[in-house]
Amino acid sequence: MKDINLDPEDWEKFEKLGHEMITDMTQYLKNIKEQKIWQPIPEELKDQYKQNLPQEGTDLKKVYEEFNKIIKPYNMGNIHPRFWGWVIGTGTPGGVLAEMLTAMLNPNSGGANHSANYIEDQVIQWAIDFMGYDKQASGLVVSGGSMANFVGLTVARNVKAGYDIMTEGVATSKNEMIFYGSDEMHSSLDKSMQLLGLGYNSLRKISVNEKFEINVEELRNTIERDIKDGKKPVCIIANIGTVNTGAIDDIKELSKIAKKYDMWLHADGAFGSMCKLSKESNHLVEGLELADSLAFDYHKWMYVQYEAGMILVKNKDYHYKSFSLTQEYLVHQTRGLGSGDLWYSDYGLQLSRGFKALKIWMTIKEHGIKKYGEMIEQNIQQAIYLTKLVEENHNFEMLAPTNMNIVNFRYIGTENKDLNKLNEEILFELQERGIAAPSNTVLNGKFSIRVAISNQRSRKQDFDILINSIEEIAKELI
Ligand SMILES: *Cc1c(COP(=O)(O)O)cnc(C)c1O
């Protein structure tokens, strides 16, 4: 029998198709603003997503044609300049090419002696640099903020448990371990608590003030009460930019409290910590470096392609001890491919790991960190601009103070309609007509149109278009 493999039989044809894809990609990204942001998948097309398992191969060009027909037109739309839903990044064209090169090399960045691990080390050092974080810190490129939070809380639990929890588990704990954050915290922190065996109930949700920042006084009282009740306060979680409103907790105050009670301080700076890069706005996140661990995303407000996040841990030893478990088949050799000091599987949950660091490395090199600072400041200025448009128009009102890049507002230009219902309708219309894609939240019982600008393609006029379109849609609906 002939040996078989999965390489192309005709490499020239493969190359030609590759060129075609790059040409299409360039045209698509170049003209993305002319496209509808989003359109629902037609019912009659949905059968196309339920095909039988392919038994025989199809020419790759045919598969690409199918991609163009049933996948590309129904994309999420976050690469469009007027996508402002949740907190979602746009990616960059350079990042597309980086992803292609990553896929070509296809290394496993779990360990061993090869360039991918040196590049990961390089981007961690750069992050330590632009975050102004401890030079001795360790880090890990992860899939996103959720995983970064999980790693941070794991180290927090292990270090502060007061016994060998890694060996004995939570069952032998004498005192219930308690973590604290505000009730505006991200749900990934709840998930981490569950996975760490501590349970949702051990995550105290402290109320927030009118700026949606944690009530420090209530935090102190809750810790004191827990101690009296025989519980063990382990970790305070600081929000550096909440999802709802972009609120930033008083991290300096939280750091003092953590020190006083010998607790870990973890910062969830998924998108907010990027403020650090802006010369004009980095004062907003002052004190970030006080955190024992810092979680953030590249795929949100650094515009890097999905997925890419990072965790930094101030004490490298703590980080390493929480995740290194070297079996014989993984013993680090002194020479050859199995050598080297950079085994990132010793710093997180995954053994096999993709080379996510390359797109971070390439795009930071391509644009320079200064440009990223300017981009972030541009998004902040756009949020201020939109806030002004809202405040100067009597048909609108703000629903929360604008923090960084997040604007919460609603339409109020009528007295005869339920405003929650009306604003929800407006949002659906904006999205379904493919005009703009904010998302929504509820603030103090009011339905809010929520614009989060982590978009490198948005321009000032896009916000004029948003406000004008809302007025038009509202008139139609009333
Ligand atoms: C998005 C987000 C997360 C989760 O990050 P993912 O990258 O989506 O996993 C955590 N915290 C905050 C504040 C976020 O905005």
Image (cartoon, helix red, strand yellow):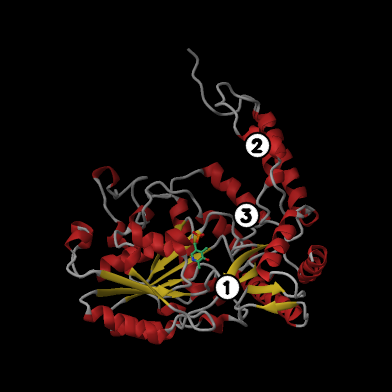
Q: How many marks?
A: 3
- Residue 163 in percent (x, y) is at 18, 67
| Amino acid type of the residue tagged 1 in the rendering | Gly
- Residue 331 in percent (x, y) is at 27, 48
Choose top left, top right, bottom left or bottom right for residue 42: top right
Upstream in sequence: badge 2 or badge 1: 2
- Cα separation, mark 2 vs mark 1, equals 36 Å
The disc at residue 467 is: none
- Residue 114 in percent (x, y) is at 43, 49
Q: Is residue 466 left or right of residue 1?
A: right
- Along the line of sight, the residue nearer the viewer: 189 or 283: 189
The disc at residue 95 is: 3
- Cα separation, mark 2 vs mark 3, equals 30 Å
Q: Which marked residue is nearer to the observer: mark 2 or mark 3? A: 2
Q: Which residue is mark 2?
A: 46
Q: Which residue is mark 1?
A: 445
Residue at screen point 64% across, 70% down: 448
Choose top left, top right, bottom left or bottom right for residue 412: bottom right
Q: Is residue 394 left or right of residue 346?
A: right
| Amino acid type of the residue tagged 3 in the rendering | Gly
Q: Which marked residue is nearer to the observer: mark 2 or mark 1? A: 1
Q: Is residue 237 visible?
A: no
- Along the line of sight, the residue nearer the viewer: 35 or 141: 35
Upstream in sequence: badge 1 or badge 3: 3
| Amino acid type of the residue tagged 2 in the rendering | Lys
Residue at screen point 70% across, 35% down: 44
Mark 3 Cα shell of 10 Å, populated few (<14), some (14-19), many (≥20): many
Residue at screen point 78% across, 80% down: 393
Q: Is residue 377 left or right of residue 234?
A: right
Upstream in sequence: badge 2 or badge 3: 2
- Cα separation, mark 1 vs mark 3, equals 40 Å
Secondary structure type for disc 1: loop
